[in-house]
Amino acid sequence: MNNIGHNNPPMDPKETIQKNIERKKPILDRDPQFFNNVPLPSWIELSLIDVCNRACSFCPKADETLAPNTYQKMTMKLIDKLVEDLKKVNFDGYFCLCGYGEPMLHKDYIKIINKLGEVGGIEIVTNGDLVNEKSLLNIYNSKASRLLISLYDGPEQVIKFKRIIKNVGIPDNFVVLRDRWYSADEDYGVKLTNRVGTINIGNQPNPKNFSDQKCFYTAYQMLLDWNGDVFLCPQDWQRRQTVGNIMQEEIFKIWTGSILTKFRKQLLKGERKNNPCNSCNANGMVYGEKHAKAWDPNSG
């Protein structure tokens, strides 16, 4: 995994973004799995807890009127149900612990990682504030596949975390350090979007420029909130379009359900005409072309 880390300075924001994209391509650009002749998602993002201890200016959490910290958290009952559902369809994809909050603030995040690890790989995305020698070793000894630490304060954090990694004695490539301390002129070192009309900071393109652009999100991924609600995609920070709840029905039924099917058909044709997609300026074709073609041979 050395070729997909970005732990060695000097760093460059454009290079960081590209390496972040390349890291996920083997998962999201692979041939999709099928169950009952239906393509399955390869990526499931979980929002374990609805709180973050930071308020980054490019994140909706910076505005309490848009994304308040509710401190609601996912239960093990929900995790057990999710894993049970995924075993029924022989899921063999990846989980990402990120969503609308800081996953390490959930007191049971190690237990959750080990349960999810029964069916798939796991990436944890953290701001690093709770990463120390003890917590890093616990994560490494769990079923986690990789830990991504977003560095918002400055390049001195690279030295700090490389020291922690060395002291713990784990492989350097288990941890990916992502430089995110840049200015608005450099889009903060992230692939900046308006989070479906939620924020307008940095060099944001006009959503109208994407009105006829295809989007593959609904072909390869799902986003689960703390209470089991499944949302259209991770860009929808205002949680405007729920497609189901895994505590009320099996995840495969949600994946093939009428709401998600309607949006998927539209987006694979380049029709961003319905809310919230008509307010989005995200490039939805970065990943998932093979998944999209499995749903619609004319997409991609």
Image: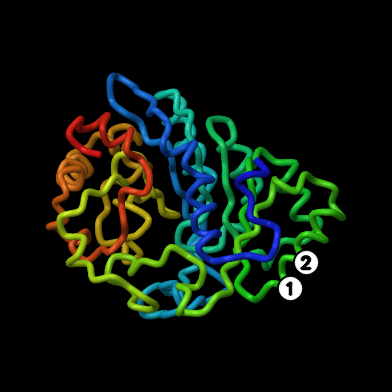
Amino acid type, label 2: Ile
Foreground pick, 233 / 189 = 189
**Relative to 198, residue 126 above or below:** above
| Quarter of the rendering occupied by the N terminus | top right
Mark 1 crowd level (few <14, some 14–19, many ≥20, 10 Å Cα) = few
Q: Quadrant of residue 276?
A: bottom left
Query: Residue at (43%, 41%) from the top-left corner?
Result: 43
The residue carrying pointer 2 sits among few (fewer than 14), some (14 to 19) or many (20 or more) residues within 10 Å by Cα, namely few
**Residue pictured at 87% horizontal, 55% vertical:** 167
The residue at 65%/53% (across/down) is: 176
The number of callouts visible is 2
Residue 182 is situated, as x and y percent measured from the top left of the image, at 55, 75
Mark 1 and mark 2 in contact? Answer it, CB < 8 Å. yes
Task: Reply above or below: 59 against 250.
Answer: below
User: In the visual, does 241 lie left or right of 127?
Assistant: left
Mark 1 secondary-structure assignment: helix
Name the residue rendered at 59%, 44% in the picture. 112
Residue situated in front as seen by the camera: 275 or 253:
275
Look at mark 1 in the image and give the residue it sits on: 156
Does the rendering let one see residue 217?
yes
Residue 130, image x, y percentages = 69, 64
Image quadrant of residue 277?
bottom left
Say which residue label 2 marks.
159
Point out residue 215 in the picture as x, y percentages from the top left corner: 26, 49
Judged from the image, the secondary structure of the residue bearing numbered disc 2 is helix
Q: Is residue 108 shown to the viewer in this render?
A: no
- Residue type highlighted by circle 1: Glu
